[in-house]
Image (spheres, coloured by chain):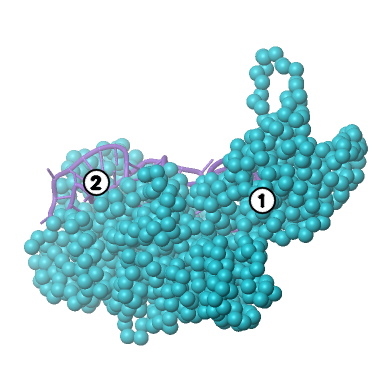
Amino acid sequence: MPMEKTFNAAEAEPRLTAAWEAAGAFKAGANAKPGAESFCILIPPPNVTGALHIGHAFNNTLQDILTRWHRMRGYDTLWQPGTDHAGIATQMVVERELAKTNRRRTDFTRDEFLELVWQQKHASRNNIRHQLERLGASCDWSREAFTMGGAPGDPDAYEGAPSFHDAVIKVFVDLYNKGLIYRGKRLVNWDPMFESAISDLEVENIETPGHMWHFKYPLAGGATYEYVEKDVDGKVILQETRDYISIATTRPETMLGDGAVAVHPSDERYAPIVGKLCEIPVGPKDERRLIPIITDEYPDPEFGSGAVKITGAHDFNDYQVAKRGGIPMYRLMDTKGAMRADGAPYAEEAAKTQALREGAEMSEAEIDAINLVPDVYRGLDRFEARTRVVADITAEGLAVMTSSDDPRLGKPKKQKAEEEDAPTEVPLVEAKLIMQPYGDRSKVVIEPMLTDQWFVEAEQIVGPAIEAVRSGETEILPEQNKKVYLHWLENIEPWCISRQLWWGHRIPVWYGLNMAMMGDKLSAAGLTPESPPEDWDGIDIGAELAFDGLVQAGEHSHCAAEFGGVSEKFLDDLAALPAPLNHARIVEVEDKEAAIHTLAEALAAYAAEDDPTKLIYPVWRDPDVLDTWFSSGLWPIGTLGWPEETEEMKRYFPTSVLITGFDIIFFWVARMMMMQYAVVGQKPFDTVYVHALVRDEKGKKMSKSLGNVLDPLDLINDYGADAVRFTLASMAAMGRDLKLSKDRIAGYRNFGTKLWNAIRFAEMNGVYEAATPTAPTTPSQTANRWIIGETASVREEVDAALDAYRFDDAAKALYGFVWGKVCDWYLEFSKPLFDSKDAEIIAETRQTMGWVLDQCLVLLHPFMPFITEELWAATGDRAKLLVHADWPMFQSSQLVDDNADHEMNWVIGLIEEIRSVRAQMGVPVGTYLPLLQLDCSADGQAAYANSAALINRLARIEKIEETDALPKGAVTVTVEGATFGLPLADAIDVAAETARLEKTLGKLGKDIGGLSGRLNNPKFVQSAPEDVVDETRDLLSSKEDEANRIKSALARLAEMA
RNA sequence: GGGCGGUUAGCUCAGCGGUAGAGCACUACGUUGACAUCGUAGGGGUCACUGGUUCGAUCCCAGUACCGCCCACCA
């Protein structure tokens, strides 16, 4: 059956995918040779937020190339697929969907909402899997993993799936028990849209136009001081009596929470007032808060006024100063970023701070409960509050004033012609670009917020992750990323891992009311609740109780069932309580409020009935979930079945290589390194290959949640998966971003067609009539010997390139070989050979061609799996699918025939030269001419004789004749060691021919000048390596030879004229 | 403010001490029995700039300019 002219990708791709799937071709260990080394790649799990973009296509193409390459080479290969639950991103997708119908997350119960997220996960996961299959990704889907696998509710759960949930819980509990995870009230980045903490990495600092306001903080009681400003030489440039201290701020609304004003200890200007009190110039006039003027190293005397307001609860710098100076931190905003509206009226709350300043003892929680937002601002959005605060202060005359022509105001320059207005007094409000923190997902301004969060002591576990990369135990490519990685890890900060979301691994921690204090109360009261239960509300929650999630059945459910296996520490604590409370039943309730209520009821019942079995100890679970990256950080061991001692852990861990984008080096790579070492004490991978970003046409970054993503499916539909893959591979130069162009994809689609037609040509010439092609013996024809050697060379090139992760080099080598060598030359050479009527020549050429094309299919398969598998099946009875074919190991040293190589290159040169001359002289393509041999070296004559049929056909030569003199109508053709003439039908245009030859001579002359100049320099001959000198000499002599031939030709022309 | 990368043919990019490359685009010719998703031939580059090292620099070093990215607490 004759082959079609082109490959029908749309028809073949699904069929081939199904065939691979049916054969189990991608299963872990498929095609492994006995005792083979393992090769394992973990897919960077795509987020279940939607579909894959072209960056994923790139990433997975590279992984697939490596996977298929190793599988064909007989490694015990596993490409582990899966998806990431992507907490914040996925929750956002679902919430956005709900918003379309005017619904919100809070319209649902937590469980109801999660049900919706699971549906999103299911749909997205199907989508992702389908897309990866379309791309030809040879993942082992029978081992699919999910970062929340094992959590209840997963619609894609299957028997034997790795339980990520177990792994995550176990790691949390272990790290908690080792003191590496702790809970505390810290200043964190708060996202007012998600109403959740986020980590430093999830904050983008963007330069935003803003303002810097300057306000006067009046000194308490109308006190004054001499303000003296000096220049660098100590000369007084300003001296005045002031009753205020000038403060600059970009965030006036935070003034409400100021705890102090700080100046540098060396700042003489403010020395007279350090230790005094000043007044925050906002809020009800009668209840202005007084704050101390303190010293701290932080303020820069050169910047602004040199005095800084300290708002510990809303600024990271101020937080540090406040901690150092024992300055109270007052939280001003609620979870949505609005000014707080809770608590007592302002006057009452402000009074508490007065007491505090005068030495009253207050707990952290009590201070946090103070709401210092004046009543008029309460409930306002933070930006609205800013406007109002500025307006109020300015109206009161407490803004620092300046002249209206002050350049700091950033006013547009006045037209020159215009009459200058006399400068007036205006408030000093500098127009300024400010580095504003934004949430990378929500795109809203992040608010530093003092809240209770969970942290990982990253500093304590980071050591081995640093050491591994420093020592090369784990290699990071390209090298420059090593520095980026190390710099971040060496300066690592505590990692905030709690998120106030619903979608994610819920933190496996339960809280109870403080047992020690409760014990006192209960025993003092004779185990009778004499005081109302509300009293206990004020009790600090001291102990966090980590239940061992792994021994506890159904621990993640919300049922109020008794707990089976709780932590030993908890049991010890419980046992230490006075009887009979030490025998209380543990019951889970919704939250703290429910706990108090439950306990009160239980105590009442116990007291009334004197029945110890009525005694209940209520606990409630932390409502927060873990940062997604906490679980993704366990991807290496989690996918392989840890904490179970699985066969896969033994075979594939540590894994071989991770292929990922540079944008998640910190988020993911660094965390995986840290956590794998912390949990199993081993590196997660040998090599990390960091690829660049695929950008859109404009060079803009594509982002998952932004929407400017390209759908790789469209490209696959238009050009076929192979073309898309080959394009991406050939653009995968290390360390540089790539911009994708459709022209390029079309070009590689054409490459597939070229290959297809080469096979079609072979098929038409009986190459596949015999049995499956085998490796050739030494053929008689030079062309056959030559192409065998070229094949061996390209195989070495491809292996070397892939070994070095040079996907682009490998792709280019294959492209150049298949198109430039096999199709352009070898197939053309074979035509006269097939026409030769010599059965032996035909047989050897068929055999050679069959073998060479087979090698092309094998070598191209990792890059273009579909078309090659299709052609593999079309060209013979194959023992195995191409996906499992043996990768060749032949050496060029065994198969390259130097003589054949040299000879064919001479033949190719001659053909090209003749073609060039013919084209320039306008000889019709179809016209056969005799070739006149004026002189020719012995090698040349032999080469010609060996390949006469090839040359004559490709160069349209009728026959070759020796001659002593070229006739009038002949143009000259020169090649290495030979001069030929081509007689044209009529007398040639002497002028045109002279011009042509002189142009060539001119080029040669330039070359010769350079080469001989170099050789004439004694220092070159002396210092350059010998082979370089020899090479230069050879080159010079061959150029001179050619130049001489052309000069002779020019002389002959001159005689004619 | 620190760090990293880029600047090579019209476009997208390789090369990185010893004759400047590829793909696409462009020009001319061509339905030659694999392929017009093609063939043949051709045009096109002081390898950003300035110094230095070297027998020799697009390539190494230093600096400059412009572009891009990452990190960072100047109120």
Residue type at mark 1: give it. Arg
How much space separates mark 1 and mark 2, taking CA atoms? 87 Å
Numbered mark located on residue A918 in the image: 2
Point 75% across, 30% down: residue: A396
Image height check: is A153 above or below A52? below
Crowding at dot 2, Cα within 10 Å, few <14 / some 14-19 / many 20+, comes out as many
Point 36% across, 66% down: residue: A154
Q: Position of residue A795 (x, y in %)?
A: 33, 70
Residue that mark 1 sits on: A331
Q: Quadrant of the N terminus of chain A?
A: bottom left
Image height check: is A170 above or below B4? below
Is A963 positioned to the left or the right of A497 in the image? left
**Do marks 1 and 2 share a subunit?**
yes
Crowding at dot 1, Cα within 10 Å, few <14 / some 14-19 / many 20+, comes out as many
Q: Is residue A137 visible?
A: yes
Residue at disc 2, secondary structure: helix
Q: How many marks?
A: 2
Q: Position of residue A118 (x, y in %)?
A: 37, 60
Q: Position of residue A252 (x, y in %)?
A: 68, 40
